Image: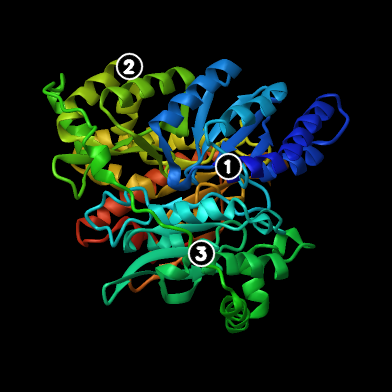
């Protein structure tokens, strides 16, 4: 903590410069782009409502219930209306008044919640598999490794002075391997002859000119983890493009040099490095499990409870303990709902909560006996969490879109609403296949612009917002993408369907048509939706 306090003193001048910049911007003294230059490295951006968004970094989306409660109190004191859960497992404070930005930063820092690297050309938030430490399929728990990296890189100034952002992630098993393959640097837990380590990808990324990464290490011993990350930071800092922003991501450096030449450069740095890991402390989950509260309360509505439980509950490696997903529509949690969530977490004895890349929340550890109580509490106090859980809308992933984001082109959330309405109709007409529609709807992703925050490049079917002139008029549209898939034999990003640019009004029926054709195919062939859409990559639709 002393080390962090000293670093925060160094950063204080930048916080003050940001607050001064906000005041100048409000008085028309500087431009919006100049303001972005001051705030983006902290994940602090202007919103269309003429207020600010502050993005809290959280390794793997994990917050202690103590920190969540503190955050709620800060929101109430400063009058921040809601939290938004991002697709990179961050907690974003929305609609922060211009004159309260520095106060909010300092209040969060006081509770060990930091902003450095929340955005801009920096080392960004670390992705971590949501169920790590809990999963029956754990190779091993990767959360302690991700925490160690985050803690050390916080003090490494080079990591916050790139030409573009650098993103890394950790997967606890092969289930999330594709997610790691589209990071600048992705780590997948492996064990070799009883020794822990990682398969390491590099040069992946989503957005313009998306790429699946290449293998850097088939097996990186765990003791070389920090060394491997700092080496990549040094290489990117020294050799990344600082002139052409459109070609400044790591994947373009790899592309321009060639894979083998880049690897040679990387290993020249790696071999000279003397960096060693800081202590990696395994997490004591049993200590947290002992604090979980047990209940005898039964759910009030048995049928609805069983459906909710089937969707949300996931078995863990611990006896009588489950993980529980809470679906959050659009990833938005108003202050009043966050307060109720705090109450629930306290009542059931939970110490941690995690945000997911699907903009939802997961309680990693819940005593199985508490499920009836939780269901009744949510039905009474936060009913939309239950209703969205069993709604197809809760499965779709959409970015915040044009009504919030300064660079958004289309209202991605509104498009998600209309798609869900049409799929709900289809499910009601064919109740025997509702489970299939519900399960596969998670493969639909909608982004309001080409930045692809919703992960279009890895989507079996995705949409990116744009505007197109049709018959002399500018029309709100989206470009269709299909075919993102990773299996043992296929690793493919989605592809743009040539000339398939749809007016927003046509998208729901287009998606319905895709699902109707898929359901028809299932009558004669057993095939996943992802494989089905991959097979249709060359269709013109």
| Whether residue 299 is visible | yes
Distance from Cα at disc 3 to Cα at disc 2: 44 Å
Instruction: Please give the residue where the numbered disc 1 appears in the rendered image.
Output: 2
Picture quadrant of residue 251 = bottom right
Residue at screen point 68% across, 29% down: 48
Residue at the spot of label 3: 226
The answer for how far apart the CA atoms under marks 3 and 1 are is: 21 Å
| Residue depicted at x 19% and y 40% | 321
Instruction: Indicate the quadrant where residue 365 lies.
Output: top left
User: Disc 2 designates what residue?
Assistant: 381
Residue positioned 49% across, 41% down in the render: 398
Quadrant containing the N terminus in the rendered view: top right
Helix, strand or loop at mark 1: helix
Sequence-first tag of 3 and 2: 3
- Using a 10 Å C-alpha cutoff, classify the residue at mark 3 as few (fewer than 14 neighbours), some (14 to 19) or many (20 or more): many
Q: Residue furthest right?
A: 29
Contact between labelled residues 2 and 3, with CB atoms less than 8 Å apart: no
Looking at the picture, does residue 415 appear above or below residue 27? Answer: below
What label sits on residue 388 in the rendered view? Answer: none
Counting from the top left corner in percent of width and height, residue 256 is at 68, 76
Q: Nearer the viewer, residue 235 or 28?
A: 235
Q: Nearer the viewer, residue 403 or 374?
A: 374
Q: Which numbered disc flags the more N-terminal residue, 2 or 1? A: 1
Q: Residue 107: give x, y in percent of width and height.
A: 59, 27
Label 1 crowd (10 A; few <14 / some 14-19 / many >=20): few
In-image side of 228 versus 444 (left or right): right
User: In front of the other: label 3 or label 2?
Assistant: 3
Q: Nearer the viewer, mark 3 or mark 1?
A: 1
When the figure is inspected, residue 349 is found, relative to residue 187, above or below; the finding is above
């Amino acid at each position: 903590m002393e080390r962090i306090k000293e670093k925060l003193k160094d950063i204080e001048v930048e916080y003050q410069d940001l607050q001064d910049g906000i005041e100048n911007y409000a008085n028309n003294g500087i431009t919006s782009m100049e303001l972005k230059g001051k705030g983006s490295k902290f994940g602090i951006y202007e919103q269309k409502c003429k207020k600010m968004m502050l993005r809290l970094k959280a390794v793997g989306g994990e917050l202690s219930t103590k920190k969540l409660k503190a955050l709620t109190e800060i929101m109430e004191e400063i009058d921040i209306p809601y939290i938004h859960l991002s697709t990179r497992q961050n907690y974003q404070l929305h609609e922060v008044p211009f004159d309260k930005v520095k106060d909010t930063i300092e209040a969060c820092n006081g509770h060990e919640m930091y902003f450095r690297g929340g955005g801009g050309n920096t080392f960004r938030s670390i992705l971590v598999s949501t169920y790590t430490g809990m999963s029956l399929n754990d190779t091993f728990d990767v959360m302690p490794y991700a925490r160690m990296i985050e803690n050390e890189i916080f003090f490494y100034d080079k990591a916050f002075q790139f030409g573009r952002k650098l993103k890394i992630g950790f997967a606890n098993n092969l289930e999330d391997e594709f997610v790691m393959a589209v990071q600048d640097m992705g780590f997948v837990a492996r064990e070799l002859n009883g020794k822990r380590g990682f398969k390491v990808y590099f040069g992946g990324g989503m957005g313009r000119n998306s790429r699946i990464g290449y293998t850097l290490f088939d097996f990186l011993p765990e003791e070389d983890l920090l060394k491997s990350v700092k080496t990549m930071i040094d290489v990117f800092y020294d050799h990344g493009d600082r002139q052409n922003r459109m070609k400044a991501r790591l994947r373009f450096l790899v592309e321009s040099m060639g894979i083998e030449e880049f690897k040679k450069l990387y290993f020249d740095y790696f071999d000279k490095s003397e960096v060693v890991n800081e202590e990696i402390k395994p997490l004591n989950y049993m200590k947290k499990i002992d604090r979980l509260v047990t209940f005898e309360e039964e759910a009030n509505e048995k049928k609805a409870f069983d459906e909710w439980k089937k969707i949300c509950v996931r078995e863990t490696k611990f006896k009588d303990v489950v993980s529980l997903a809470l679906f959050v529509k659009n990833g938005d949690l108003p202050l009043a709902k966050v307060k109720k969530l705090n109450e629930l977490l306290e009542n059931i004895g939970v110490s941690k909560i995690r945000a997911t890349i699907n903009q939802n929340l997961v309680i990693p550890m819940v005593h199985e006996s508490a499920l009836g109580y939780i269901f009744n509490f949510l039905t009474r106090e936060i009913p939309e969490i239950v209703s969205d859980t069993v709604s197809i809308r809760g499965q779709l992933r959409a970015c915040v879109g044009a009504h919030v984001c300064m660079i958004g082109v289309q209202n991605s959330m509104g498009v998600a609403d209309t798609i869900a309405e049409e799929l709900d109709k289809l499910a009601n007409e064919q109740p025997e296949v509702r489970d299939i529609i519900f399960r596969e709807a998670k493969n639909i992703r909608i982004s309001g612009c080409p930045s692809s925050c919703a992960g279009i490049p890895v989507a079996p079917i995705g949409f990116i917002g744009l505007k197109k002139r049709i018959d002399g008029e500018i029309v709100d549209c989206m470009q269709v993408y299909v075919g993102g898939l990773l299996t043992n034999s296929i690793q493919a990003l989605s592809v743009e369907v040539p000339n398939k640019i749809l007016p927003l009004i046509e998208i729901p029926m287009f998606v319905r048509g895709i699902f109707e054709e898929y359901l028809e195919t299932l009558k004669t062939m057993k095939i996943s939706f992802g494989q089905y859409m991959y097979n249709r990559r060359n269709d013109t639709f």
